[in-house]
Image (tube, rainbow, N blue to C red):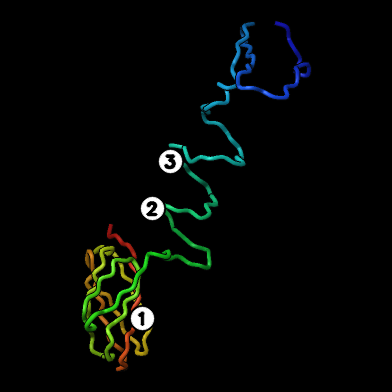
Amino acid sequence: MATIAISALPVATSQASADVLPIVQATTSTTKQLSIANLFTSPAFVTPTLGTVASGNISACTSTSMVMVTPVIGAATGTSLTATGTVVSTGTAGVGYATGAGGTVTQATSRTTGVTLNKTTGAITLFSAAGSATAATFTVTNSTVAATDVIILNQKSGTDLYDLMVTAVAAGSFNITFRTTGGTTTETPVFSFAVIKGVIA
């Protein structure tokens, strides 16, 4: 087979999928042909170095062990996230629950009447009554709560100031014990809570 200089090769202006490429084996003079369609339709790359990929779609990838180094994720959605290191936020919005995670409920007949609110965060409006320095307790039934969880509680509104305590955390419920630090205003104060998922091992 004659040797042809690269500079003497014709310049192709287009390439159809049925066109072929000549392949010359190093040890023989046999010329093989490789279809353009076979070359570029579903090629399999083995340990390629891709460099910087400008665009593309990797949604069909089946590997579940992809490692991304300092990715810019943008607005991501999903059902869970597992991290082995510290999860931090540098944004001014902070870390918290999204819209739809919370709810509200109002006590029906007294300040010791239990309420049900199956949300991981929310606000409880107490029954209208005078404040008292004597402690009172009511139960919050909440299906999102596990016995290992931590309940964060604070007073959202009300003229009297209240001491608040979370007691008896169990699967499906927790108790709120409260009393005023001084004040007998008849009102409907609001207590806010948030469930922090916890484990003991």
- Image position of 67 with respect to 94: above or below: above
- Of marks 1 and 3, which one's residue comes earlier in the chain? 3
Query: In the image, is 51 to the left or to the right of 47?
Result: right
- Of marks 2 and 3, which one's residue comes earlier in the chain? 3
Q: Residue at x 72, y 22 (%)?
A: 12
Per the rendering, the mark at residue 79 is: 2
- Of marks 1 and 2, which one's residue comes earlier in the chain? 2
Within 10 Å of the Cα at label 1, are there few (<14), some (14-19), or many (20+) other Cα atoms? some
Q: Residue type at mark 1?
A: Gln
| Residue assigned mark 1 | 155
Q: Secondary structure at mark 2?
A: loop
Eye-nearest disc, 1 or 3: 1
Query: In the image, is 25 to the left or to the right of 57?
Result: right
Q: Secondary structure at mark 3?
A: loop
Q: Nearer the viewer, residue 30 or 42?
A: 42
Per the rendering, the mark at residue 65 is: 3
Task: Tell me the quarter of the image containing the N terminus.
Answer: top right
Q: Residue at x 69, y 24 (%)?
A: 14
- Image position of 81 with respect to 169: above or below: above
Within 10 Å of the Cα at label 3, are there few (<14), some (14-19), or many (20+) other Cα atoms? few
